[in-house]
Image (cartoon, rainbow, N blue to C red):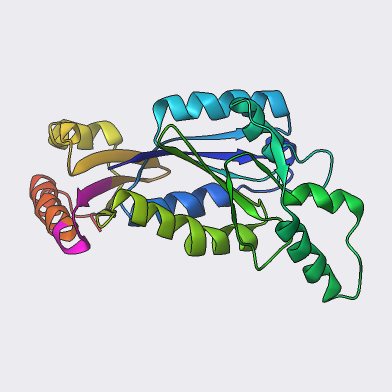
Amino acid sequence: MPSAEILTIGTELLLGEIINTNTQVIALALRKIGVDVYRTSTIGDNTERIADIIKESLQRADILIMTGGLGPTVDDPTRQAIADAYGLELVFYSDLWDGIVQRFAKYGIQPPENNKQQAFLPAGASSLPNPRGTAPGIHLEVEGKDIFAMPGVPVEMEGMLNEQVVPRLKSKYGLTGAILIRNIRVDHIGESQIDALIGDLEELSNPTVGLAANKGYVLIRLTAKAENEDLAEALLTDLEKEIRSRLAGWDNIS
């Protein structure tokens, strides 16, 4: 299975001004098609730092999915950062500009000149249609690996993710697999007590077991990868039976 990293861009995220929901949406979408997400990052609107983390991410992962920084203003550096990361020129596409003009025309206005930067793509990249906004997304393949850049506006990002990015990934990587998660909640028992009973299961490679301590309860997270959802469900069911058997002495399991 291919591996992916997620990069969200925006100084407002680092300042805590808005909640970053895009990472969760992307991670869930990738999980459904069997793509492993190994790392997520957030970075401010700095072209040099974005370029550095793009190169760093693709040294580890097969896919980098980015959101944010595709607007028309000076502090929207994603296009330039992608180009700088690989020494590419930004190329103007008149058809993209025509699409932006037509979208503004629906509201009886002419787009400001700075919107023109949304019609530039790094050389060799293709655009991802954005029927919900003015900023096209970007898809660039570098040495067999994929960069996808999408707008940060959640409704635009989610539409582009489901309509453009996911289908392209499924087609390129022949993704037919699934990653499913199931949680077992155990109340009023310490994480260390549970670990003492199922610690060997936490070393499994597939399905995997993880513990997440919360106030007053612990979640035992089971994750299974398989060729389809039915096989993944079967793996989870067998593992869940084993865990519940080991915790049978406790009454507060759900």
In the rendered view, tell whether residue 237 sits above or below residue 148.
below
* Quarter of the picture holding the C terminus: bottom left
Q: Is 152 contained in the magenta span?
A: no
Q: Is residue 43 visible?
A: no
Residue 166 is left or right of residue 254, and the answer is right
Question: Residue 142's spot in the image, x, y percent?
Answer: 48, 34
Question: Residue 47's spot in the image, x, y percent?
Answer: 71, 29
At horizontal 22% and vertical 49% (from top left) the residue drawn is 225
At horizontal 71% and vertical 38% (from top left) the residue drawn is 90
Question: Residue 226's spot in the image, x, y percent?
Answer: 18, 52
Between 91 and 108, the one lying in front of the other is 91
Question: Residue 140's spot in the image, x, y percent?
Answer: 53, 42
- Which range is magenta? 221-231
Between 192 and 55, the one lying in front of the other is 55
* Quarter of the picture holding the N terminus: top left
Residue 161 is left or right of residue 14, and the answer is left
Q: Is 228 contained in the magenta span?
A: yes
Q: Is residue 168 visible?
A: yes
In the rendered view, tell whether residue 229 sits above or below residue 10.
below
| Number of on-image labels | 0
Between 225 and 245, the one lying in front of the other is 225
The quarter holding residue 103 reads bottom right
Residue 94 is left or right of residue 183, and the answer is right
At horizontal 79% and vertical 46% (from top left) the residue drawn is 117
